[in-house]
Image: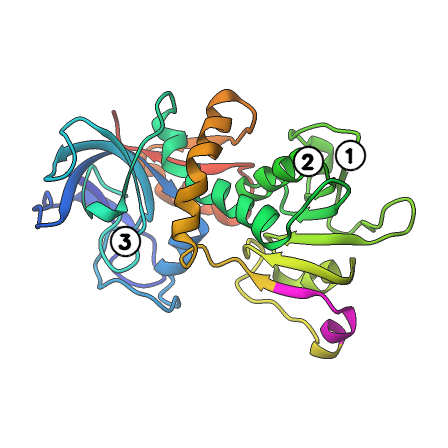
Amino acid sequence: MRAIVMDRWGEAPHLRSWPDPVRNPGCSLVRIHAATVGHLDATIASGNFAVQPDLPYIPGVEGAGTILESDTWSAGEKVMVRGAGVGLVRDGTWCEIAEVPDEALLPAPEGMSPELAACFFVPATTAYVAVHDICRVSDGSRVAVTGAGGAVGSIAVQLALQAGASVVAVTRTPRSWAGPRSDRLTVAHPGDDWVVDDGRRVDFLIETVAGPGFATHVAQVTPGGTCALVGYAASPELSVEVPNLILADVSLVPVNMLRREERAREIAVALAEQLIAGDLVMSTRAYEPSDVVTAETDVARGSLGGRAVLLFGR
């Protein structure tokens, strides 16, 4: 089979011929149709993540395909792949055939394309948890979402608007905003003052960017507010002066979806239904496996406005 393989930490992966996997008890063989390229994949490949697979390994923590062989699924069933250490402590989804634990499989939503099925789960559930479980956004809330043009950010904007909030969508390209329109939505540049007309700061910040501007972002949250720290598109590091954070009195809550897997699976079905119906929108960009380095570069630059997906055929 064809597989994309990492030989050394911090180096580019390579597409090559690789032995077909052999199925072990408790696992299924899945023909991968689409596999996601995301920030987590790059973080793992850097060798600096707390959890590491053995080298060489096949990256990819998410994907979608059909069952080839399984004790618990019927051949031909459409499934999503994620969790159970896939792409983290064992080979992932950047290949034509993946051997994955049965607990890493979910039924693919009927009527959803493989591209979307491969990549909707993490951004949609992460955005939902940030908006509803952590920030508890409600009618009349004021919310800022950084990286609003990205997958998680765009869904968070849409969910906050659905909840009745006034939303500041913060993006580096406000003039080319292609997201939702609403009289409760303001599209802003990261360097802008997000404070609304009446001078009140936002109640909640959903932070997907982090990096050097993080302290400035937190300063625009009202005392007693909450920052849901979702991602690190600008940098895996952030700097904030502790005295200023204490003075700001903003609760900083990391959104660790690895610990919220049960909750994510609980809410994924309803989110998928909204995406299929068009009530929520998330864009994808498809790449051939041979273009994986380009896909990784586009993800790192934050230039997609959605999610990158490798297509291995259907």
Q: Are marks 1 and 2 in contact (CB under 8 Å)?
A: yes
Q: Which mark is residue 103?
A: none
Bounds of the magenta segment: 244-252
Give how far across and how far down residue 62 sits, in percent. 34, 44
> Residue shown at 22%/64% (left/top)?
54
Question: Closer to the N terminus: mark 1 or mark 2?
Answer: 2
Residue drawn at (36%, 36%), measured in percent from left and top? 118
Relative image position of residue 183 (x, y in whole percent): 80, 30
- Say what amino acid the circle numbered 1 marks: Arg
At label 3, which amino acid type do we have? Ala
Tag 1, which secondary structure?
A: loop
Residue hosting label 1: 184
- Residue 133 left/right relative to 161: left
| Res. 150 visible in picture | yes
Disc 1 and disc 2: Cα gap in Å? 7 Å
Would you say the residues marked 3 and 1 are in contact, meaning their CB atoms lie under 8 Å apart?
A: no
